[in-house]
Image (cartoon, helix red, strand yellow):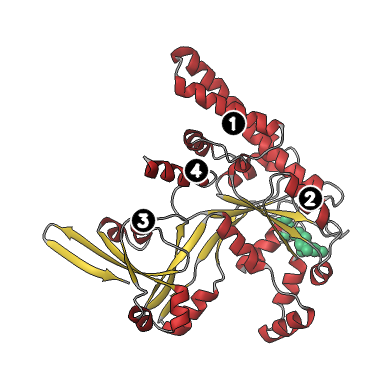
Amino acid sequence: MEKKKEEKKDEKKEVCLLGRPGNTLKMGIVGLPNVGKSTMFNLLSKAQVPAKNVMFCTIDPNQAKVEVPDKRWEHLVELYKPKRKFPAALTIVDIAGLVKGASKNQGMGNEFLSNIQSVDGIYEVIRAFDDEDIQHFEGDVDPIRDLEIIRDELMAKDLQTIDRSLEDLEKVIKRTNDKEMKLKKEMLEKVKQMYDEKKNIRDNSDWNYKEIEWLNEYLFFTAKPIVYCINIPDEDYVRKKNHYLKKIVDWIKNNGGGKIIAFSCSFEERLGQMSPEEQQKYCEENKTESNLGKIITAGYQALDLIHYFTCGPDEVKCWTVRKGSKAPKAAGIIHTDFERGFISAEVMKYDDLNKLGSEAEVKKAGLQRNEGKNYVVCDGDIIYFKFNVSDPGKKKKDKAK
Ligand code: GDP
């Protein structure tokens, strides 16, 4: 009974993520036009998406798999010197700019909103740079107004879904007097009330298990985790000051909170033109650094993703799983046979390997543990799975790396 309760508690924590199962989750870049979304996407992915000073130049969503920086992985590559190496990756989608009225299909709003619906988490890009040459859709630069436009459009679109659903539910309830449907209706009314108060679904920790299941059917916008990326001018980034920033941080704090990263497209573009040696020298002299890695990591973490490693002379590879995944499920990412025929997982902690210097030393110290099917995989585990799949006429027993 206790265990069941615990399990439910664990699942509840994932209110915003359970909507889509699996681990190929995506972060979508969302914001008004001309705030730096495509530039940020290009910087993150180095993929060439047209980033011109043109409204709606990004019509189709562009996707890129970007490397999640991890010093542990770099160290493991040095240690094992494998033939192949695979870092952890995060899928990022560049979504065209939303404008006021998007929920009423202004500026192709419906299409762009449905692109946001298809991602699991949101990077919201906010413009905090003044530049008269770069037209602002609303006429002037005002980050708080922009934050409110995006919030209100996302909520307005969800409210359309809610109203339609409430109508349908009322008909069903009238016909069947179904108790469950009544509870579902109450839940939707609660969301409606929250939206009236401009509160996000993700910020309420009181949802019960059933409500979470229902919420995930809808994939509401404000249930998605969010990372706010504030695009400030180059010089502000280097001197660590921007006159919009305090107001933005206060607004976000008063509106449910969320991870906030100040970055600068123009700084990152300038840094990108330098050689690695010049970059290092410049960053040391100016006590600054690129924030792109932080943005990627924050997105990965917002989606509750972690990775474990498989290491050997052939390859060192990061495998991305959802936080809380048990060993068989994590094994299934390598191959479904590994999950089906799961026997056990031999687990080393990266920190032990780092401290002791080699796999042999970790084993000698008795720190490689044999874990069973209830083991919850931790970020940075180094794992060898043992599995056994018996098919008629074909026996396979293996220790998989
Ligand atoms: P999007 O519409 O939000 O995708 O915006 P883009 O990334 O296409 O950028 C629109 C224009 O703003 C381009 O001309 C960019 O070069 C410019 N831009 C982007 N970031 C910055 C910035 O930090 N400072 C300045 N001055 N211009 C920027």
Q: Quadrant of residue 389?
A: bottom left
The amino acid type, in three-letter code, at marker 4 is Lys
Give me the disc on residue 329: 3
Give me the disc on residue 161: 1
Q: Residue at x 75, y 45 (%)?
A: 254
The amino acid type, in three-letter code, at marker 3 is Lys
Query: Viewed as shown, does residue 278 lie left or right of 234?
Result: left
Q: Quadrant of ligand 1?
A: bottom right
The answer for how far apart the CA atoms under marks 3 and 1 are is: 34 Å
The amino acid type, in three-letter code, at marker 2 is Asp
Question: Where's residue 52, x and y in %?
Answer: 74, 61
* Secondary structure of residue under mark 2: helix
Q: Quadrant of the N terminus?
A: top left
The answer for how far apart the CA atoms under marks 4 and 1 are is: 23 Å
Q: Which residue is mark 2?
A: 250
Q: Which residue is mark 4?
A: 12
Q: Earlier in the sequence, mark 4 or mark 3?
A: 4
Query: Are dots 1 and 2 in contact, CB under 8 Å?
Result: no
Camera-near label (3 vs 1) is 3
Q: Residue at x 52, y 21 (%)?
A: 169
Looking at the image, which is closer to me, 335 or 326? 326
